[in-house]
Image (cartoon, rainbow, N blue to C red):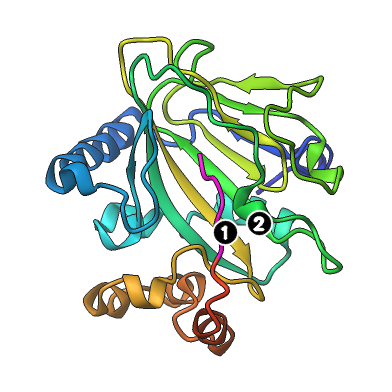
Amino acid sequence: MLTSSEKQQLEDQGFLAFPDFFSPEQVAAFNARVEELFALEGDGAGSEFKTESGARRIANAVDKGEIFEHVIQTPQILEAIAVVLGPDFKLSSLNIRSANPHNGCAQPLHVDSGALPDALGNSVCNSVWMLDDFTERNGALRVVPGSHKWFRIPEPGAKPEGEMLVTGKAGTVVVMNAHLWHGGSENFTGQQRRAMHVYYTRGDKPQQQYQKRLVRPEVQARMSPLGRRLLALDDPRNDELSATGSGASGFMK
């Protein structure tokens, strides 16, 4: 489904946007469920993973509605993830991040889970599903194209040349090599800026959120074979990684 030029952009620049990937009706359905979850979880929203000053969060979304179960299995996005990670990968986490109005801060540049490529290559890849328009004023994703090839993490306060904002309409999906230097920008507007972050990792690495423990048995039981593979429900490597406590950490958008 991907063209050779799209694959090349992922390789060279470290990110690829799919405009109008999901419909306005789907955007509305996702946002309705997201706002229900924020209302239900209140001050504890996102606490399974982390909370963040200046943003609302929902964690472990696979367990919080069938609408999210389907997202992790989207074929075109999975093809793009495989360009970065190869064929052996799994879901690391599915979180929601909503940059608060006038939040007064930009997220530091980072690489997801603090990970760098290793002898086997890339190990982390993220997809950002825009639930609101991403503009130059409302906390859009900022990236440093090509930085996934630098094999180092950004120092605190880093302001490298070439940093750019990734803007787009709600319904856009951005697949990003998560070794790329990136972060959320400041929201100067009076509205929330919401996005889903469907984050994958290589099969030999730990999940950021151990899905076999976090996802309820009834949800696991209705997952398709592909869904079970992506959640690593039947992968003994994943159980061993969890048992050793080698879970991932670090910023997520």
Residue 250 counted in the magenta span = yes
Mark 2 lies on residue: 124
Q: Residues within 10 Å of mark 2 (few under 14, many from 20)?
A: many
The three-letter amino acid code for the residue at tag 1 is Tyr
Residue linked to disc 1: 200
> Is residue 192 a member of the stretch shown in magenta?
no
Assess disc 1: are there few (<14), some (14-19) or many (≥20) residues with their C-alpha within 10 Å of its C-alpha: many
Q: Answer with mark 2 or mark 1, whichever residue precedes in sequence.
A: 2
In the image, residue 220 above or below residue 83? below
In the picture provided, is 146 more to the left or to the right than 247? right
Whole-percent x, y for residue 7 in the image: 77, 44
Residue drawn at 54 percent across, 69 percent down: 247
Q: Are marks 2 and 1 in contact (CB under 8 Å)?
A: yes
User: Farthest residue toward the left?
Assistant: 40
What's under tag 2, amino acid-wise? Val
The location of residue 28, given as percent across then percent down, is: 26, 32
